[in-house]
Structure formats: C-alpha cells, structure tokens
Amino acid sequence: MKINIYFIIYNFYSLSSNSILLAKGATYLKEIAVRVDDNDLEKAMRILKKKIQNDGLFKRLKLKKNYEKPSEYRRRKKREAQRRQRIADSKRNLRYRSY
C-alpha cells in the first residue's frame, strides 16, 4: 500500500520597488511541496527543512521577530554584501589558480 502525502507551505515574498510586474510593496506566494513515499515521514521532514533553509524562510522569520533599527539594517546589509563579495572573489581565485 502506497500513500502519498504532500506538505505544502506558502510563504509570502515582498517585492522591491524596482519590480516591473507588481506594485511597490506587493507580495506573492511561493509554494514548497514535499511528497512522502512509503510512510517515511522523517525523510520527508528532513527534505522539507532543507528546502525551507535553502529558501531563506527561517532567516526572514528570525529577522522579523525583533525590530531592527535602520542603522543596524544598513550595517547588516553591508556585511552581507561584503561576505558575498568575499565568496565571489575566492571562487574567482580558485578558478584561475594554476596547478
């Protein structure tokens, strides 16, 4: 007997003001679905958790839990940009490294 159960999570994304499709501050839904095969709920929950982490939902929820001052927001955004740049530079250096 095979039972298929689907976990579906809808999360809202707010779009920035430079979006062409929707007006400023508009939101849209994104669906995260996981299929459960052979009553293996543990595996399905691991897959669901991984998808949610990759989607960034946990991070957004953590940031929304407390108020973030505008100066802290700018500082965090700057740190994230520096981290992304550092990672991109390290990948670029690995690509051109001679062996």
Image (cartoon, grey):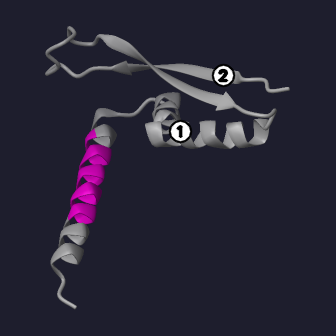
Residue 8 image-quadrant placement: top right
Q: In this rendered view, identify the residue nearer to me: 44 or 54.
A: 44
Q: In this rendered view, identify the residue nearer to me: 45 or 28.
A: 45
Relative placement, left or right, of 89 versus 11 is left
Q: In this rendered view, identify the residue nearer to me: 2 or 73.
A: 2
Q: Give SS at disc 1.
A: helix
Q: Earlier in the sequence, mark 1 or mark 2?
A: 2
**Residue placed under numbered mark 1 in the picture:** 51
Residue 6, numbered label: 2
- The rendered magenta stretch, by its main secondary structure, is classed as helix
How far across and down, in percent of the image, does residue 22 sit? 22, 10
Point 13% across, 22% down: residue: 18
Q: What residue type is labelled 1?
A: Lys
Q: What residue type is labelled 2?
A: Tyr
Of marks 1 and 2, the one in the foreground:
2
Split into 4 quadrants, where in the image is the N terminus? top right
Residue 97, numbered label: none
Between the C-alphas of marks 1 and 2, the distance is 14 Å
Relative placement, left or right, of 18 versus 72 is left
How far across and down, in percent of the image, does residue 37 sit? 73, 33
Point 66% across, 22% down: residue: 6
Point 28% across, 63% down: residue: 87
Q: Does the magenta stretch include residue 83?
A: yes
Relative placement, left or right, of 83 versus 18 is right
Residue range corresponding to the magenta coloring: 74-88
